[in-house]
Image (cartoon, rainbow, N blue to C red):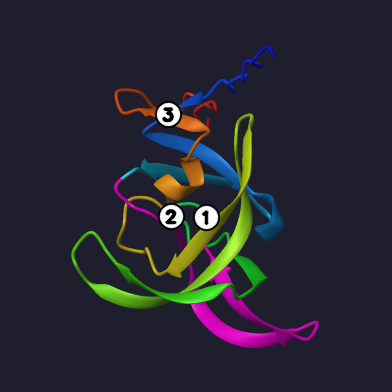
């Protein structure tokens, strides 16, 4: 009996930063940092509250998708997937809401787990962690915007 060759899917190559979309949150453009040191992705969110929506516990929050721009704001409502203790890069532990949402970067699209945190003081409104990339994307840290064109 012949063995069938398993066809490997070609992995995409991302730069250390990319432009992304979060279509379910109506975020058309957000600059993200690819952070393979982080397990879970993290999104800048503020004014978080628990609400009931269609019989489910959800989190309502606001997002400023563009760094240094407090005018553009998106209000989002997502089902709560989990609450998890997350350790930041500074070693600070914080219990965060976890949601699932679709992340798009160029031809890449995937449902990803995202923790919600206030990232006002950080350089990027979103970090994309290694769980979101697993099996699909390789990262070239010497380049930027390989999946997406630099925003003009």
Residue under label 3, please give it. 138
Picture coordinates of residue 47 (x, y %)? 51, 79
Tell me how far mark 2 sits from mark 3, CA to CA. Answer: 21 Å
| Magenta-span inclusion, residue 42 | yes
Which residue matches tag 1? 65
**Residue at x 32% of width, y 51% of height:** 123
Q: Residue furthest top?
A: 2
Q: Which residue shows up at 49% across the image and 52% down it?
A: 66
Tell which residue pokes out farthest to the right in this image: 54
Q: Position of residue 140 (x, y in %)?
A: 35, 25
Where is mark 2, residue-wise? 125
Around disc 3, counting alpha carbons within 10 Å, would you say few (fewer than 14), some (14 to 19), or many (20 or more)? some
Q: What span is in magenta?
A: 37-64
Left or right, 112 with respect to 39, comes to right
Q: Earlier in the sequence, mark 2 or mark 1?
A: 1
Q: Magenta segment: does it hold 134?
A: no
């Amino acid at each position: 009996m012949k063995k069938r060759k398993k066809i490997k899917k070609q992995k995409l190559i991302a730069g250390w930063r990319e432009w992304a979309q979060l279509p379910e949150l109506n975020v058309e453009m957000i600059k993200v940092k690819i952070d393979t040191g982080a397990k879970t992705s993290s999104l800048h969110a503020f004014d978080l509250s628990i609400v009931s929506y269609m019989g489910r516990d959800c989190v309502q929050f606001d997002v400023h998708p563009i760094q240094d721009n407090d005018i553009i704001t998106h209000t989002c409502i997502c089902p709560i997937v989990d609450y998890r203790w997350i350790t930041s890069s500074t070693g600070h532990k914080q219990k965060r809401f976890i949601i699932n949402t679709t992340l798009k970067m160029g031809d890449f699209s995937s449902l990803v787990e995202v923790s919600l945190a206030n990232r006002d003081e950080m350089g990027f409104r979103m970090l994309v962690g290694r769980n979101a990339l697993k099996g699909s994307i390789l990262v070239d840290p010497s380049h930027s915007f390989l999946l997406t064109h630099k925003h003009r």
